């Protein structure tokens, strides 16, 4: 059964509209999405500039910044959608994984609004939400049609690198994930080594544009016979090369180092995903999460003629609340309604969803 699940209860009169709230990391975001695909508003306030001075996310600063920003962002999301809370069917909110202090801010905001307006809340897994960004309408969608099952999903973000087979809506079989650093984390750490700004992914991508990806042959951890990934050896190899080069009087070839590092990450991500898609006879491939904004990764996937590859438009790759409302729709029509006493789940794996 690959059709969209049908509503089990509640409003059959008119499209289902959910407010989405996302505060799992350093983006404070709110959005209204209709029917899991039509984005009526999508507001994201990034704290990246604030955390850049620390060279990474400072968790306590992140939660306090969410406290300041969340209500104005929710108001903006409603205003931009030309709706009031009375027009909504529920609130989808990120429950995990993520930073606990940050998740709690979004959860409590959702609970307060839900209680005051008699709306149901739906706690959403952030990784599942990244996947559902591929169903959101956008003029910049990489593929016109929706993804088809069985679907091979690669989620590459700052905290996760996960490979999963999706057999139907809301059904996942986890194949593997990173054994150490997540792909985005590797970008962030290597950027720091190269003296580039936080967040490291966009900075490395920019530096790599002017570099030669064959200048350094960095290791690829293929981890044969497993669908797992490992990026810490690659990071250490870059560190060793930087130390060696620093002992010379020559300027650090940042562009070549960035390009060679990026090529190694892309090579492993693309080839392991394609192998898994063949092995499990997937119809389509889906890439999501912040690292899927990377142009080299996008291009390499699009260059393969074997599979249709769904990659969200850039603004939906990195953290946003439209994806939370999008996943919320599928959970809502599946009947999920959560109690007002739900807690944050900072380490909530995708494998626990089915
Ligand atoms: O999904 P996301 O916004 O937040 C998490 O759920 O973690 O992903 C953020 C990660 C960061 O590590 C950032 O450096 C990386 O995505 N990222 C990129 C690019 N844009 C963001 N990595 C590589 N290339 C990019 N263009
Ligand atoms: Zn994310």
Image: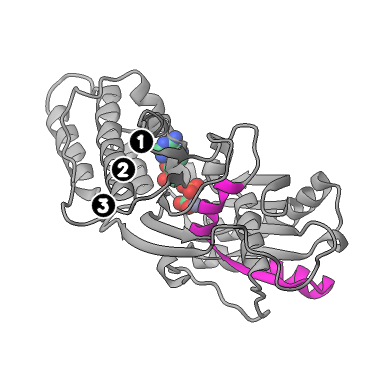
| Left or right: 312 as drawn, with respect to 114 | left
N-term-proximal mark, 1 vs 3: 3
Tell me, yes or no, whether the highlighted magenta stretch contains residue 131.
Answer: yes
N-term-proximal mark, 2 vs 1: 2
Report whether the residue tagged 2 is closer than 8 Å to ligand 1. no
Circle nearer the viewer, 2 or 3: 2
- Up the image or down, 120 lies above or below 73; here it is below
Q: Which mark is residue 336?
A: none
Residue at x 32% of width, y 46% of height: 273
Residue 162 visible in the shown view: yes
Residue at the spot of label 2: 274
Residue at x 64% of width, y 73% of height: 336
Residue 199 visible in the shown view: no
**Residue 213 x/y as whole percent:** 25, 24
The answer to whether mark 2 and mark 1 are in CB contact below 8 A is yes
Front residue of this view, candidates 330 and 219: 330
Residue at the spot of label 1: 306
**Residue 45 x/y as whole percent:** 64, 46
Q: Which range is magenta?
A: 108-135
Using a 10 Å C-alpha cutoff, classify the residue at mark 2 as few (fewer than 14 neighbours), some (14 to 19) or many (20 or more): some
| Left or right: 331 as drawn, with respect to 247 | right
**Residue 322 x/y as whole percent:** 65, 50
How many angstroms separate mark 1 from mark 3 (CA)? Answer: 22 Å
User: Quick one: SS at disc 3?
Assistant: loop
Q: Which mark is residue 229?
A: 3
């Amino acid at each position: 059964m690959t059709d969209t699940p049908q509503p089990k209860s509640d409003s059959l009169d008119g499209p289902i509209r959910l407010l989405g709230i996302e505060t799992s990391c350093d983006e404070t975001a709110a959005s209204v999405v209709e029917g899991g695909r039509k984005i009526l508003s999508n507001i994201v306030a990034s704290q990246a500039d604030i955390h850049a001075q620390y060279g990474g996310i400072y968790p306590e600063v992140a939660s306090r910044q969410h406290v300041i920003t969340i209500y104005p962002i929710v108001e903006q999301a409603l205003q931009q959608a030309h709706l009031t809370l009375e027009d909504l069917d529920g609130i989808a909110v990120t429950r995990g994984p993520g930073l606990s202090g940050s998740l709690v801010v979004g959860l409590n905001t959702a609970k307060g609004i839900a209680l005051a307006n008699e709306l149901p809340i739906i706690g959403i897994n952030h990784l599942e939400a990244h996947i559902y960004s591929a169903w959101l309408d956008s003029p910049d969608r990489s593929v016109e049609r929706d993804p088809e099952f069985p679907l091979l999903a690669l989620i590459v973000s700052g905290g996760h690198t996960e490979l999963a087979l999706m057999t139907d809506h809301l059904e996942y079989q986890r194949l593997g994930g990173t054994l150490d650093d997540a792909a985005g984390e590797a970008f962030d750490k290597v950027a720091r080594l190269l003296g580039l700004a936080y967040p490291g992914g966009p900075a490395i991508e920019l530096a790599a544009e002017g570099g030669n990806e064959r200048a350094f042959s960095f290791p690829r951890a293929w981890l044969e016979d497993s669908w797992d990934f490992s990026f810490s050896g690659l990071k250490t190899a870059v560190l060793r090369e930087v130390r060696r080069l620093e002992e010379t009087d020559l300027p650090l070839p940042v562009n070549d180092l960035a390009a060679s590092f990026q090529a190694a990450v892309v090579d492993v991500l693309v080839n392991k995903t394609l192998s898994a898609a063949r092995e499990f006879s997937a119809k389509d491939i889906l890439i999501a999460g912040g690292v899927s904004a990377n142009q080299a990764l996008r291009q390499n996937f699009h260059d393969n003629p074997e599979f249709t590859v769904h990659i969200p438009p850039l603004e939906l790759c990195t953290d946003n609340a439209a994806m939370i409302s999008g996943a919320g729709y599928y959970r809502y029509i599946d009947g999920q309604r959560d109690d007002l006493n739900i807690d944050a789940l900072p380490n909530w794996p995708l494998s626990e969803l089915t």
